[in-house]
Image (cartoon, rainbow, N blue to C red):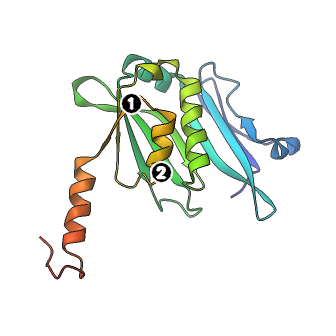
């Protein structure tokens, strides 16, 4: 992953800028000082002696506003294998009016290890004081570290997505281990 460029929002346009050389030694690089309310951070880690982005969080002022208006239900969807660097995209969404969902944060994670997931969730909490009103989190079945989610949000009900659970059960029943054919 190239660490030379970071995106900085400036008055509705996007500009690229090189990361300062000394930022690679820091564990966190702020990339959102130009537009008030926008939050973007790059968390840097060392892997095999190389500095890499462990994860990146992105949240606009509008996303923060949406979550503050609809903080009761949070949906987290993990997308795997969608880019050549094998980063996982975790999209945090709020359940808004008329059954619509709106993105309230994106996080690109290099791995799904518990410390990485916990830090991404703590970053969400730090930028959204309304998280204390959160009552329910809906996740897909691919959320591998349920314990990290329970630790970050101990008083919140965690539900698995019915679609993903049904799909998983159909695939398991249709597997060769059971000798059934696909439905």
On the rendered structure, is 112 left or right of 155? right
85 to the left or right of 4: left
Element on which disc 1 rests: loop
Residue 120: mark in rendering: none
Residue at the image position 54 percent from the left and 27 percent from the top? 125
Q: Which residue is mark 2?
A: 145
| Picture coordinates of residue 103, whole percent (x, y) | 42, 34
Q: Is residue 164 left or right of residue 128?
A: left
Give the mark count.
Answer: 2
Q: Is residue 76 above or below residue 174?
A: above
Q: Position of residue 117 (x, y in %)?
A: 55, 45
9 lies left or right of 100: right
**Relative to 123, residue 65 above or below:** above
Q: Residue at x 39, y 17 (%)?
A: 69
Q: What's the distance in space between the residues labelled 2 and 1, CA to CA?
A: 15 Å
Describe the element under mark 2 as helix, strand or loop: loop
- Give the quarter of the image for residue 174: bottom left
The residue under the point 51% across, 44% down is 148
The vertical placement of 177 against 93, above or below, is: below
Which residue is under mark 1? 156
| Residue in the image at 44% along x and 37% along y | 92
Of the 4 image quadrants, the one containing the N terminus is bottom right
């Amino acid at each position: 992953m190239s660490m030379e460029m970071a995106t900085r929002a400036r008055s509705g346009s996007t500009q690229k800028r090189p990361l300062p050389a000394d930022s690679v030694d820091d564990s966190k690089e702020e990339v959102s000082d130009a537009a008030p309310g926008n939050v973007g951070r790059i968390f840097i880690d060392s892997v095999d002696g190389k500095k890499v982005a462990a994860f990146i969080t992105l949240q606009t002022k509008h996303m923060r506003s949406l979550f503050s208006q609809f903080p009761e239900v949070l949906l987290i969807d993990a997308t795997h294998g969608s880019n050549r660097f094998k980063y996982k995209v975790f999209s945090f969404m709020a359940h808004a009016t008329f059954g619509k969902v709106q993105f309230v944060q994106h996080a690109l994670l290099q791995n799904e290890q518990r410390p990485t997931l916990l830090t991404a969730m703590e970053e969400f909490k730090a930028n959204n004081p309304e998280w204390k009103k959160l009552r329910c989190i809906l996740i897909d079945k691919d959320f591998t570290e349920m314990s990290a989610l329970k630790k970050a949000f101990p008083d919140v009900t965690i539900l698995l997505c019915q679609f993903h659970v049904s799909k998983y059960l159909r695939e398991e029943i249709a597997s060769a281990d059971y000798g059934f054919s696909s439905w």
